[in-house]
Amino acid sequence: MPSKLNIVMIASEVVPFAKTGGLADVVGALPQVLQQMGHTVKVVMPRYGSIDGARYGLRRFWDSLGVWMGNTLEWCAVDVAESGGVPVYFIEHDRSFGRSGLYHDDSFHDYADNPRRFALLTRAGLQLCRDLGFAPDIVHVHDWQTALAAAYLKVWHWNDPVLGRAASVLTIHNLAYQGQYSAEHYEYLGLQWGNFTPDKLEDHGAINFLKGGIVYADALNTVSPTYADETRTPELGYGLAPYLTDRKEEYVGILNGVDYTQWNPAVDLLIPARYTPETLQGKALCKAALQRRFHLEETPQIPIVGVVSRLVGQKGLDLLAATIERIVESMVVQFVVLGSGDKGLESFYGGLPGRYPGRVGTFIGYDNLLAHWIEAGADFFIMPSIYEPCGLNQIYSLKYGTLPIVRATGGLDDTVLQYDEQTGAGTGFKFWEPSPHAIFDTVGWAVSTYYDRPQHIAQMVAAAMGQDYSWERSAAHYLGLYGRALRNKARL
Ligand code: ADP
Ligand code: GLC
């Protein structure tokens, strides 16, 4: 493998420009770290209507980029901005991206043209490389939205002077979202009907973007070792387990890193006070500020359990909803909840402060500042996920000395060490059963440890804050995966 790689990443969301979840954090951070290691990285994403061009210094790069989609030539413009030294190219195509939502409208209805929008993004990213004369060694794509890059490279560009030597790498951040769409869109994708077969792009008569990526990519990964294993089982494989098992040699789990310039209480300028393991009085100030902000009883002795989450089925917050009132009624504990998504869950959690004033605070919406405040001010952070490919919040929590209470699944299981009551070792509290009952018991375990064994809590906080999930380590694993992809491609 060449010691310096040319890498292009194509993704549907990238911090700081557009974000709905952890994918954006990953594609915001990994390219910068790879570039600092000496590789040349370019990032391609859509120019959504919600991106404030002036705020991020976007400038026009090209007025026209012609992209063939089936028999249609789509004309896009390209903007560019710098992010931590990495150029980010924005594909502008008003009809596709000139709306504020990334994937759905305000009522959470997916846009009907999503398959066309993201196939266009993907092809435009490849076409941009050709027109730039930028020959990537690696085309790294993320989730169903850009998975088809692997297919385009094999079907169309295997002999191309610019793209011909590129190996494709697909990162699966969530196997449940596969991009399954009616075959009526297939013509537009321009992938030839001969490839619309069950071993490639077809899935029971429909198109399946992610499956196409899995079949065509030169190497692939998901975002934790445990989730990599889980996705090869019928329960969490969502119909794709056999295809992942087929790619066993080239399919690995690589834990996400954390951008510790953003998520570290020692340097975080968004929180009320900074702190380190040696200066934990700063955390006490953050706790008091959080209690004030959410009109909670301002008592340092009462533990706070935090939630920051998309309110969707995956996150298990319906299970928490089924037991949180019992918890609040039977334990001396406070909750702070930040999230948006499912309307039923929004109204349930939104109604709790009215029923438990001074005990529960809720903010329905998306608010990065509050996310930082909760990480810093809470004592515990709960993630009862049904499945969790990696999860970033629990890793942030560790650094903030906010002990995670998690269901032992996917990346949650890989990053949180179970508390040992005998020795005080561990970094959090884990449970296995996806049930309200198990949540109740485990919150009870954490809360009673807080009151009865404070020395163990102090020991765990120190251990948690000492954990290192910086991107450098993950990036080294990605370089290993890139090597695997290049070798695999060379074999074919
Ligand atoms: P997922 O990508 O499945 O949502 P992750 O834990 O990987 O889960 O990443 C979630 C990211 O989104 C974190 O950076 C978290 O702080 C952020 N986040 C989620 N919901 C909100 C919200 N309501 N307000 C602010 N940030 C949020
Ligand atoms: C997905 C997963 C989450 C993961 C994130 C970034 O949104 O749900 O677990 O941390 O992608 O990889």
Image (cartoon, rainbow, N blue to C red):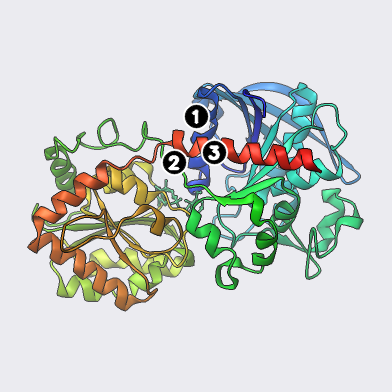
Residue on which the image places disc 3: 27
Q: Residue at x 70, y 28 (%)?
A: 78
Characterize the local packing of mark 3: few (<14), some (14-19) or many (20 or more) Cα atoms within 10 angstroms. many
Q: Position of residue 36 (x, y in %)?
A: 50, 23
Vertical placement of residue 328 versus 178, above or below: below
Q: Position of residue 133 (x, y in %)?
A: 78, 22
- Between the residue at mark 2 and the residue at mark 1, the CA separation in whole angstroms equals 10 Å
Question: Mark 2 and 1 residues: CB-CB less than 8 Å, in contact?
Answer: yes
Q: Amino acid at mark 1?
A: Val
Q: Amino acid at mark 3?
A: Val
Which element type, helix, strand or loop, lies under badge 2?
A: loop
Q: Nearer the viewer, mark 2 or mark 3?
A: 2
Q: Quadrant of residue 316?
A: bottom left
- Between the residue at mark 2 and the residue at mark 3, the CA separation in whole angstroms equals 11 Å
Q: Residue at x 74, y 45 (%)?
A: 150
State left or right for residue 89 relative to residue 431. right
The answer to which of 486 and 177 lies nearer the viewer is 486
Vertical placement of residue 407 versus 428, above or below: below
Question: Mark 3 and 1 residues: CB-CB less than 8 Å, in contact?
Answer: no
Q: Residue at x 37, y 76 (%)?
A: 435
- Is residue 17 visible from the viewing direction of this image? no
- Between the residue at mark 3 and the residue at mark 1, the CA separation in whole angstroms equals 10 Å
Residue on which the image places disc 2: 257
Q: Which mark is residue 286?
A: none
The answer to which of 9 and 489 lies nearer the viewer is 489
Residue on which the image places disc 1: 33
State left or right for residue 103 relative to residue 301. right
Q: Earlier in the sequence, mark 2 or mark 3?
A: 3
Characterize the local packing of mark 1: few (<14), some (14-19) or many (20 or more) Cα atoms within 10 angstroms. many
